[in-house]
Amino acid sequence: MQAVILDSGKIPGALVDVLGRPLIEHQLDFLFGGGIESACVCTGQVGYGAFRDWLRGCDYTGRVELVTNNNHNGGGIGPLYNLCSILERDNFTEGVVVTAGNRYFDFPFSGFVEFCGAHDGDTVVIMDVKKGGKADRCGMVAVTSNERVISFAVDPSGKKGTPLVALPLIHLSAETIPYLGRYLAEENDADCIGSFLEWSYRFRPLFAYKAEGKHFRVTNAASAKKIASHFEKSGRI
């Protein structure tokens, strides 16, 4: 299984220092430790040089490809155009895990991979908003007893819907990739993958993997300290 990490912000959250290492290295530990074989990091032109310098000296050289959204914009502007171009270029026959570069997830990722393999469709990670915190999210969901998503609505405010929130850690099956092109051709929102899921679950099965753990959104040194504190309290660092 492969992964695409989208980090197109002016200030790359993925390169914020967390306990002496860039966040993206912790994220790659999480992904590769759970079954991911290779990753493609898509960044904007502003952050490309910093990512290039990081990649030259990191332990994952050879397993991580770096691309810019300037080269993979698919004819439009926005992270989902970049994603669509990468997916079409690389022909992901087994599907792909998509996540955001400024996020960190702390739960057993191998369980998510196993769940994806057992379900014929797409999969999104969900957490209880009361347990996972009110960090930025890509949507709120309702699910059936067999983990099938029956309602998905993007709601960054968190003021409506169910207590279950979807996080930007998503497995898209190979069969779904053409739907992303169709979604963009209809000139839908190209900035939020949650908006794509809100559109696509009506056409493709979408399942919810409920994770027990923590989710962090990193944008600066202050938010990075929250992860460091979490690691220190858990005894993992």
Image (cartoon, helix red, strand yellow):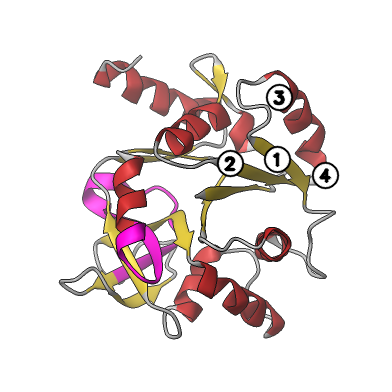
Mark 4 or mark 2, whichever is nearer to me: 2
| Image vertical order of residue 74 relative to residue 205, above or below | above
| Label 2 residue SS | strand
Residue under numbered circle 4: 45
Mark 4 or mark 3, whichever is nearer to me: 3
Asked whether, in this view, residue 124 is left or right of residue 213, the answer is: right
Return the residue found at the far left. Answer: 145
Residue under numbered circle 3: 54
Q: Quadrant where the C terminus lies? A: top left
| C-alpha separation, residue under disc 3 versus residue under disc 1 | 12 Å
Q: Amino acid at mark 3?
A: Trp
| C-alpha separation, residue under disc 1 versus residue under disc 4 | 15 Å
Pointers 2 and 1 in contact (C-beta within 8 Å): yes
Q: Nearer the viewer, residue 149 or 116?
A: 116
| Image vertical order of residue 52 relative to residue 66, above or below | above
Region rendered in magenta: 116-141
Residue under numbered circle 2: 38
Question: Residue 132 lies in magenta, yes or no?
Answer: yes
